[in-house]
Amino acid sequence: MNYTEFFFTNQKKIVVSKTLKEFEDLLTDLNFYRVHQSHLVNTKCIREYVKTEGGHLIMTDGSLVPVSTRRKTEVLKMLDRL
């Protein structure tokens, strides 16, 4: 069985028994973006993009989310549109 972990801005976390792909399909129209094989982020919670060490996002809660090399160009285009 596949599991997806959700991390909320209030530091709470829940685990759901659906794939990240299922949530990507549901949430893309609600400002969520797949930045890595293992990460789907709320674009409203992105503070900045850091280019070093392969690239990662700093979220409004201070957490760091890696950006995959394969998705880097797409992520940078998405950030330009924000």
Image (cartoon, rainbow, N blue to C red):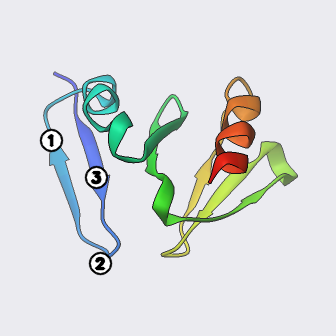
Q: Nearer the viewer, mark 1 or mark 2?
A: 2
Q: Is residue 27 left or right of residue 70?
A: left
Q: Nearer the viewer, residue 32 or 72?
A: 32
Q: The residue under label 2 is which amino acid type?
A: Asn
Distance Cα–Cα, label 1 vs label 3: 8 Å
Residue 65 in picture, x, y percent from top left? 57, 53
First along the sequence among labels 1 and 2: 2
Mark 1 is surrounded, within 10 Å at the Cα level, by few (under 14), some (14 to 19) or many (20 or more) other residues, namely: few
Q: Residue at x 16, y 21 (%)?
A: 1
**Secondary element at tag 3:** strand
- Mark 1–mark 2 Cα distance, whole angstroms, equals 18 Å
Q: Is residue 60 above or below residue 38?
A: below
- Residue behind mark 2: 10
Residue nearer the viewer, 79 or 3: 79
Alpha-carbon neighbours of circle 3 within 10 Å: few (<14), some, or many (≥20)? some
Q: On the image, numbered disc 1 is attached to which residue? A: 16
- In the rendered structure, find residue 6 and report the number of the disc placed on it: 3
User: Contact, CB < 8 Å: mark 1 with mark 3?
Assistant: yes
Q: Amino acid at mark 3?
A: Phe
* Label placed on residue 32: none
Q: Residue at x 64, y 41 (%)?
A: 78
Q: Can you give x and y, in whole percent of width and height, for residue 49 in the image?
A: 73, 57
Which residue is located at x 32 percent, y 30 percent? 20
